[in-house]
């Protein structure tokens, strides 16, 4: 392990639970942070991204952060995106830096290259000009920019991971089932957990890194070779493996 206490924000979400399970199974020391308690996790801070006090409490003695907590898709910009995905990011980065956190692994989205995915060329690389889908994706660009800034200014190790589609509801499973492109950006909960465990351990060549994370696609939408090289992660599952977790089977 990269060493020390790992804080997982959004620990009660679909990906968060998988990450906590993977890390704790490996013997890592994990603290959760979410609006509701994460089942089975003893070290847990219940709080919100808009509370500086909650976040400061969660940061104590933390060496590595996996920041997953966010409004998870397009929603009302002023009511949800700004508080959670803009102000929340500000609090997370500032409090992390002041607490002496060494590594931040932050959840961006494949939606920041939405139109490259549609027009090509494929696979979409990490160095292409972003074309965010809408306000959610634009806020993820803010997250990535904050990560680059803190890597340069403070020397923090930052991994911005552009996640594929890890469905949260049966309805989203059906959306993926109906679209071939969606199946190629599918991210199973188990692969998500393994990715973040690898990201904690990875030896990074630079302070700031952008990578993609999906399960095994039939047609590669995103550059997963860079992910393998930098993070040491290779997906084990492909659509529809893992949907039983979402469907409650």
Image (cartoon, grey):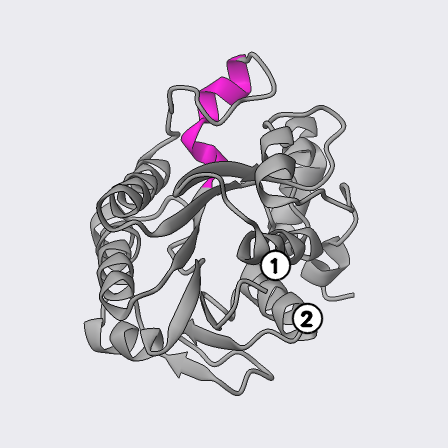
Residue 43 percent across, percent down from the top left: 48, 84
Quadrant assignment, res 15 = bottom right
Viewer-proximal residue among 110 and 209? 209
Say left or right for 168 vs 90: right
Q: Quadrant of the N terminus?
A: bottom right
Residue at image location 27% in from the left, 41% down from the top: 152
Helix, strand or loop for disc 1: helix
**What's the mark number on residue 26?**
2
Viewer-proximal residue among 7 and 113? 7
Magenta region, main secondary structure: helix
Residue at image location 56% in from the left, 52% down from the top: 199
Label 2 and label 1: CA atoms lie apart by 9 Å
Residue at image location 24% in from the left, 51% down from the top: 154
Say left or right for 107 vs 141: right
Is residue 123 depicted above or below 78 in this figure? Answer: above
Residue 47 visible from this viewpoint: no
Magenta stretch bounds: 109-119
Q: Which residue is mark 1?
A: 197
In the image, farthest residue toward the bottom: 42
């Amino acid at each position: 392990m990269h060493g020390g206490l790992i804080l997982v924000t959004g620990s009660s979400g679909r990906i968060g639970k998988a990450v906590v399970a993977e890390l704790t199974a490996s013997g890592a020391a994990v603290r959760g942070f979410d609006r509701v308690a994460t089942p089975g996790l003893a070290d847990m801070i219940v709080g919100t991204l808009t509370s500086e006090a909650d976040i400061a409490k969660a940061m104590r003695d933390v060496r590595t952060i996996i920041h997953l907590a966010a409004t998870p898709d397009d929603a009302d910009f002023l009511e949800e995106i700004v508080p959670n995905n803009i102000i929340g990011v500000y609090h997370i980065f500032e409090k992390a830096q002041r607490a002496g956190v060494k590594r931040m692994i932050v959840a961006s989205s494949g939606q920041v290259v939405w139109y490259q995915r549609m027009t090509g060329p494929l696979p979409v690389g990490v160095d292409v000009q972003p074309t965010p889908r809408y306000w959610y994706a634009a806020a993820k660009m803010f997250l990535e920019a904050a990560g680059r800034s803190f890597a340069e200014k403070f020397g923090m190790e930052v991994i911005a991971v552009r996640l594929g589609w890890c469905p949260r509801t049966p309805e989203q499973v059906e959306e993926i089932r109906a679209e071939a492109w969606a199946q190629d950006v599918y991210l199973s909960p188990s692969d998500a957990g393994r990715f973040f465990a690898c990201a904690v351990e990875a030896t990074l060549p630079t302070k700031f890194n952008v990578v993609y994370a999906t399960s095994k696609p039939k047609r590669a939408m995103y550059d997963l070779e860079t992910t393998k090289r930098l993070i040491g992660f290779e997906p084990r599952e492909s659509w529809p493996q893992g949907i039983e977790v979402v469907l409650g089977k």
